[in-house]
Amino acid sequence: LFKKEMLVSSRNFKGIVWFFFLLFIWVIQIAAHLVVGDTIQKYQPDVSHKQIMLQVLQYSIAIYFICSFTLRFVFPSFSVEKKTAWILGSSPLSFKKIFFGKYFFYSLTFILLGMFMSYINTVVLNLPITNTLYLVVLFVSTTVFIVTLGLVFGAFFPSFETDDPEVITTSMPGLFFTGFALLYGALSDGALYLTLTEKTPLFVIGYLMFTVLVIWLLLKKTLSSLSERIVF
């Protein structure tokens, strides 16, 4: 299933164009951020607070792009298989295996992508190891949550009218997913800011525990509710 998702994604020309378009915008943003960070380092005598704000801002932008990738690729992943649904439907595979095949593929892909871009930001800002650790923990947990939310929304609200991702993402479930994902991203931004300003890991620990609980509840509800019905 992991290989199947990889092959389907790599053979979708329009999806590949969208992927590199979003990635290109992200790279441009990082380059602009490099110029801003270098300017602050040169002309500001005290950069400690400015560095925290830059780190939080960069983290917020990274989460925004993860939301964009998830909305474009993860949320419509069940609906776009409308024409080939009979293949999975006739195979001896449970919904649980199909769901987790997509889940692990997209989670791993976006985590690796985000970690690479975060590494560039860490080098640019010259962050201490503790700040980098906080950022990594929050980013990975938030990315997994956003992917979980996107896949759950896509499974509960598949499109029966079209398999065009551009149309599916602008549907009402797509808009609700975008709102919830951005709100949760803002919550993680707040946790990062409080952690850096208060110099305590309690906010990160609390956020991580809450995120794990919410992810578990979402997966449990989805698998128990949809295991016996076809969602695509």
Image (spheres, rainbow, N blue to C red):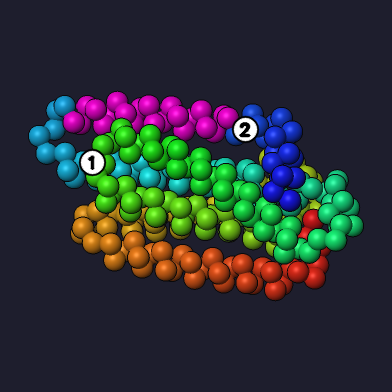
Asked if residue 39 lies in the magenta stretch, the reply is yes
Position of the C terminus, as image quadrant, is bottom right
Res 33 quadrant in image: top left
What is the C-alpha distance between the residues marked 2 and 1? 32 Å
Residue 124 versus residue 164: which sits nearer the camera?
Answer: 124
In the displayed structure, 145 sits above or below 168; it is below
x and y percentages locating residue 220 in the rendered image: 62, 72
Q: State the SS at label 2.
A: helix
> Counting other residues with Cα less than 10 Å from the Cα at mark 1, is it few (<14), some (14-19), or many (20 or more)?
some
Residue 173 visible in this rendered orientation of the protein: no
Return the residue at label 2.
18
Residue at 67%, 52% (x, y): give it.
Answer: 102
Residue type at mark 1? Gln
Return the residue at label 1.
51
> Counting other residues with Cα less than 10 Å from the Cα at mark 2, is it few (<14), some (14-19), or many (20 or more)?
some
Residue type at mark 2? Trp
Residue at 81%, 61% (x, y): give it.
Answer: 93
Residue lying furthest left: 45
Residue 62 versus residue 116: which sits nearer the camera?
Answer: 116
Q: Main secondary structure of the magenta part?
A: helix
x and y percentages locating residue 158 in the rendered image: 74, 56
Res 185 quadrant in image: bottom left
Q: Which residues are magenta?
A: 20-41
x and y percentages locating residue 100 in the rendered image: 67, 58
